[in-house]
Amino acid sequence: MRATFNPSKNAEPMTSTDSNRSPVQQQGGPLAGLTVLDVSIMAAGPWTGALLGMLGADVIKVEPPAGDGTRWVLPTQNGMGTNYMAMNVNKKDVTLDLKTEEGRNHALALARGAHILVQNFRVGVMDRLGLGYEQLREVNPRLIYCSISGFGETGPLREAGCSDPIMQAYSGFARLNGAHGESLDAFRFTGFIDLSTAAVAVEAVLAALIDRERDGQGQEVRVSMLEAALEMQCTRVAEWLGGGELAIPRGSESAAFAPDRAYQSADHEIFVSVCRASEWTGFCQALEMPDLAADARFATNQLRVRNRAGLDRAVEPVIAKRPAIWWLRAFGRHGVASGLAHHFESFRYHQQIVENEMIAPIATPWGEVVVAGPPWHFTQTPCVVTSASMPDEHNAALVGGTKTVVDERRKGSRERAPMLEGLKIVEIAEGVAGPLAALRLSELGAEVVKVEPSSGDYMRGAFPIPEGDEDAAAFVELNRGKRSFALGSAVQAAGGVLKRLVEQADVLITDHSDEQLSSLGLQDLIAASERGESRLIVISISPWGRRGPISSRKGSELTAQAMAGYTRYLGIHGQPARRLGADVASVGTATFAVQAALAALYWRAMSGRGQRVDLSLCNSLLAMKSIHLAAQSNPDEYKGPRVGGANHPPELGWGARDGRVFMAFGGSVGPTGRAGWSDFVKEVGLEKLINDPRCDKTGRSTTGHGAHVHELRATYEEAFARFPAAELVALIRKHRGNAAVYYRLDQTLTHPQTQALEVVQEVTSEGKARKVRRFPARFSKLRPKVHARAPRLGEHSGQIARELGMCADELSATCEAGGSCA
């Protein structure tokens, strides 16, 4: 008999009648014993399966007879596409023709024995094949069915083709990047939105997995590249919806903090971030500029952002006088995050990367390949990376099997309270990564207590703070639905109140170092969790990882992007560096942190034991760079954007009459390729390209004629100048190409397609209406909460203190530390 799932700390270990699931600890990841059927191609779907495989699930990849197209995407290594090798680690492989009755029957047999299915075909394809969710739930009611799409499964663009650069254009992601005065700079790191989508998909699948353990019912999970791209931009979305501040290209500058940018030193650019008041003091001390610290124009972050130009005029000549190594040491001594930009060869063998296993060299049938290591490091259920399988390698062993998942579907409503109801989370974290992870878990039903210093989370002072508000728009978005406990030094000495709070928690999310946690009296609780001797789950987030020579160095969004080589995929080498305008390191880490918490909760429900999970900003960025790591391992030829993208000119799309667009026609584009391209160039008056040899090579068109895109741009744009951008996109789609206008973020949010997905919802709190983003995935059964307001600093200190049974003296100490004791 299956026990009802209870995520709370005091619940007993659950039993399970799944034939391949043991209630005791499993080696190889927290999901060991689960089976995943991966019926997907290219990147977003396959990497969803790969991540679930790294977490310990047994993943079976189903390929069509022609094979997954990434086998031939350039570059190759010993004839196999490196993209395929990176996206299909930790899987078995079978080949089935799903268009035949025999292939469909084999797929149905595999689905009967699966716990999770992942697919990313265009909307309606799986239904037509007889393998849609409603069809499969009849044979396996416990199945979690994950559907990944480009634009979502409803709305005017639901059937439109999509790819990474298409979604960069449509979602506004590309228009956050570029130098001052430019309109956009697309991230030449193709595949990033694909992998971000996979990360969101795994987050949602794990939520559905835990929900299934409560009542035995599976459900459909729907994730789109659009929602994932907006998740990666969540802070910029919040600044627009909550503060009316539209992000624009700013070179290497942050939209929210100043100074937070790259400065040219005497020899190299150095990336520096100041977010806290104490860091501003340290910055001025490192520069030996006491007058700067006293300048009223720069007294707060709001003022520094508004007076960037004056600040830079004062700072730039000082930094230019000394080499980068000097400034690294000076900033380090004064508690300021700083770093240098790296590239593949310099970070591949960097001691920090190696010691934290952020990169995994694996032996494959095609030679050794470097791929990303797991983004999470579990102390009790360690994850590993294994090679992609040979095509059809497991047909004989797997096709025709009869394993069946026991149907224990429970009766009851299909809409219930979120599945983490009753779960207690303590968040001792500031900024973006930890708070966003806690927000997503709270939307799934958990209760979150946010522990803040008496000065508050530094994000409260991020730019912009809307008129009439006390806190930054981004802070409000990241901290909705939480309770705030203001913690000062007096409270730390008052009977270990923080320890008492954590003792009652199920999950601790923290960005504090082990030394900082020890100073708070939490070292014994952390150590017990790490050894699996308690039920507490500790999610520990750092910039650089737990081990290594720079593990104690301060880090930031910007310095992580530079360390992981991301800044090399924007702009032009030799010119000032550019950052990704979205906070991708922080948001990516938050997504992986939610995965870690949910996977650890699932394992705890089986084993009765908690554990510690370590994540870092740098590790997360490298995880989402796996495509490019593999491409640069040992390619057969120097071909394809995954090898040369870092050295290509900026990707600006194609100019139309009133804007810019991105377009792609799949496969070859010459006379032997897709006829749609030929019809398109005829209609726009470019018949001469049909016989142009640059347009007659296999694979040249997948992102716009590949190596020849820059040569052909002027030719295309001369014709495209006659068409408005939206009309040109419609014309390309008419001829079976994929295209999108490069929208600004505000245009994306008001587009009918985005509105059809109800990504943004209006809520009311204290008589004030505000717009917020919903959980970045949709479920057929789960209904995540939509919280309305963030807490004021220390708003719930007294309430929480009384819940902890604090005496009058302790309660008084709480008030003195800055918390409201109402």
Image (spheres, rainbow, N blue to C red):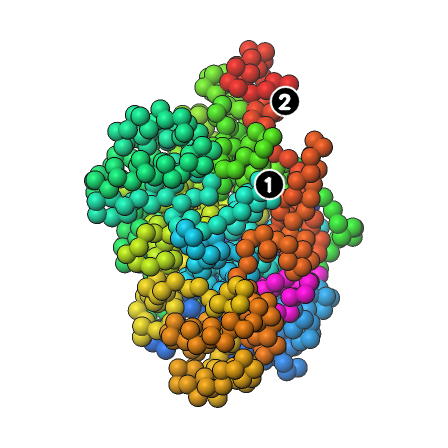
Q: Which residues are magenta?
A: 141-163
- The residue positioned 41% from the left and 29% from the top of the image is 297
Q: Earlier in the sequence, mark 1 or mark 2?
A: 1
Is residue 544 visible to the viewer in this orientation of the structure? no
Please state the horizontal and vertical placement of residue 32, each as a whole percent of the image. Answer: 52, 55
- 655 or 627, which lies in front? 655
Q: Secondary structure at mark 1?
A: helix
Distance CA(mark 1)–CA(mark 2): 28 Å
Q: What secondary structure predominates along the stretch shown in magenta?
A: loop
18 sits left or right of 376 in the view: right
Question: Which residue corresponds to the image point at 35% horizontal and 24% vertical from the top-left?
Answer: 294
The local crowd at label 1, few if under 14, some if 14 to 19, many if 20 or more residues have their Cα within 10 Å, is many
Q: Which residue is mark 1?
A: 242
Give the class, few, some or many, for how many residues have Cα within 10 Å of label 2's Cα (few <14, many ≥20). Answer: some
Residue that carries the numbered disc 2 in the rendered image: 799
The residue lying toward the viewer, choosing from 394 and 789, is: 789
Residue 142 drawn at (x, y percent): 68, 59
Q: Position of residue 604 (x, y in %)?
A: 56, 44
